Image (cartoon, coloured by chain):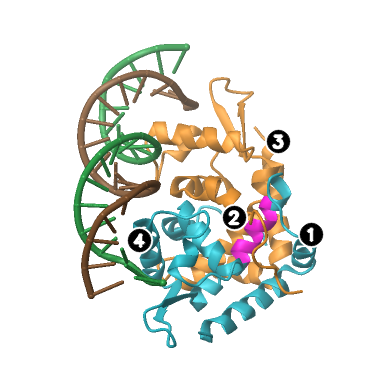
Chain colours: A cyan, B orange, C brown, D green
Amino acid sequence: MRPKKNWKGCPVRYASGILGDPWTLVLLRDLMFKDKHYFREFLLEEAPATNILSDRLKSLEAAGILCRRRDPVRGNQVYYALSSKGVDLCPTFLALIDWSARHDAETEAPAEFLAAYRANPVAFAEELARGLSANQGAD
Amino acid sequence: MRPKKNWKGCPVRYASGILGDPWTLVLLRDLMFKDKHYFREFLLEEAPATNILSDRLKSLEAAGILCRRRDPVRGNQVYYALSSKGVDLCPTFLALIDWSARHDAETEAPAEFLAAYRANPVAFAEELARGLSANQGAD
DNA sequence: CTGTATCCTTAGGGATACTG
DNA sequence: CAGTATCCCTAAGGATACAG
């Protein structure tokens, strides 16, 4: 079937309101691939100012992409993790990474990573998602 | 293989500089799914001001995502089309659309479209890409 | 038709000090 | 540690007029 053109409410509009922001993309990347979960961790590299970080975390939480909860062990720490809606963005980000690796010389992604993804994108995304979902429950 | 974490220069950074902008996403959507190719067409709906449109078109061309050339028939018209690098963004956008359709109630995407995509994402993306590449040569 | 050029205004970002 | 509050400032966007 050929993709349809000109359908009403083409969904990129919704996504553009959320993902159409550089810091948001970087944050999601950190959550998805760099195993970052704490406010201070997001500030380590490629970091926005604290107010900006705070704002983006709120937006992502409001959009249902992020879960925010207190660390049960250390009560004054807050733990951020992708919600299932956020985990569902894995295929999108993997496709984006694949694209970047192919077209941007500066980009460095491990060859095995790319090879495994390209061999079976769907299975690879599902495995990544499984790992992230398991992570949700951890402290 | 489990995806690696913390690799150097995680590629989302490159992409965020280009795609981390709402208007850019909307423009690419128009090129990819709405068959728009002329300046005036991009101004029809969900349109930025002309200077913004001009700026984004230039950025996308500079990034090698867009080809710009004079319409051979009507010389004063300019024809925009995705380059092969732009066409390569198909899998990313399809994944994004799939995600939006699943998580945003406002989003309306034809059921057959989604079903066909989900049945075989890779083949579907390739077919879409073929159609867009064919379009490149047309006037 | 395809853009520039200009003006204006505001939202948003960086830095930093400070609070629960 | 996890933010909020403030200040400052610039970059970016909308509107519109106009040029090639």
Q: Mark 4 points at which residue?
A: A55
Secondary structure mostly seen in the magenta stretch? helix
Span shown in magenta? A91-100
Q: Mark 3 belongs to which subunit?
A: B
Report which residue position mark 2 lands on.
B12
Callouts 3 and 2 on one subunit: yes
Q: What residue type is labelled 2?
A: Val
Q: Distance between the residues labelled 2 and 4?
A: 20 Å
Q: Of the numbered discs in the image, which one, if any, rests on residue B137?
A: 3
- Which of the 4 image quarters holds residue B98? bottom right
Most foreground residue, B45 or C4: C4
Dot 4: chain letter:
A
Give the mark toward the camera: 1 or 3. 1
Q: Position of residue B31 (x, y in %)?
A: 56, 45
Q: Quarter of the image containing the N terminus of chain B?
A: bottom right
The three-letter code of the residue at mark 4 reads Asp
Q: Is mark 3 on a helix, strand or loop?
A: helix
Same subunit: marks 1 and 4? yes
Q: How far apart, in angstroms, are the residues tagged by discs 3 and 4?
A: 45 Å
Up/down of B41 relative to B4, above or below: above
Where is residue B131? Give x, y as percent: 69, 49
